Image (cartoon, helix red, strand yellow):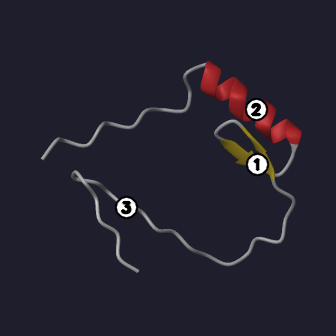
Amino acid sequence: MVFLASQPAQFLILSGPEIREPVLMHGPFIMNDQSQIDVAFARFQAGKMGHMTPLPKS
């Protein structure tokens, strides 16, 4: 497979074994149940998720 970008781009491919557990998705969060989603939203809203530094422009 060939990918062509019209401008510089970064590409990330991840793989792993099937987890065989229940999965619940809401917004950017993927957890096993609603209580975990609620905790994740509370942490995010409280600013406890950290931050990612933007990559330098090349």
Identity of the residue drawn at 29% across and 65% down = 4
Tag 3: amino acid: Phe
Mark 2, residues whose alpha carbon is within 10 Å: few (<14), some, or many (≥20)?
few
Q: In this view, does 46 lie to the left or right of 26?
A: left
- Considering depth in this image, is 10 or 15 the residue closer to the camera? 10
Identity of the residue drawn at 18% across and 41% down = 56
Tag 1: amino acid: Met
Q: Name the residue under label 1.
A: 31
Query: Hey, which quadrant is residue 12 in on the image?
Result: bottom left
Q: In this view, does 31 lie to the left or right of 8?
A: right
User: Upstream in the sequence, badge 1 or badge 2?
Assistant: 1
Q: Distance between the residues labelled 3 and 2?
A: 30 Å
Q: Is mark 2 on a helix, strand or loop?
A: helix
Q: In this view, does 53 lie to the left or right of 40?
A: left
Query: Hey, which quadrant is residue 2 in on the image?
Result: bottom left
Q: Name the residue under label 3.
A: 11
Label 1 close to label 3 by CB (< 8 Å): no
Mark 3, residues whose alpha carbon is within 10 Å: few (<14), some, or many (≥20)?
few
Which label sits on residue 39?
Answer: 2
User: Upstream in the sequence, badge 3 or badge 2?
Assistant: 3
Residue 52 drawn at (x, y percent): 39, 37
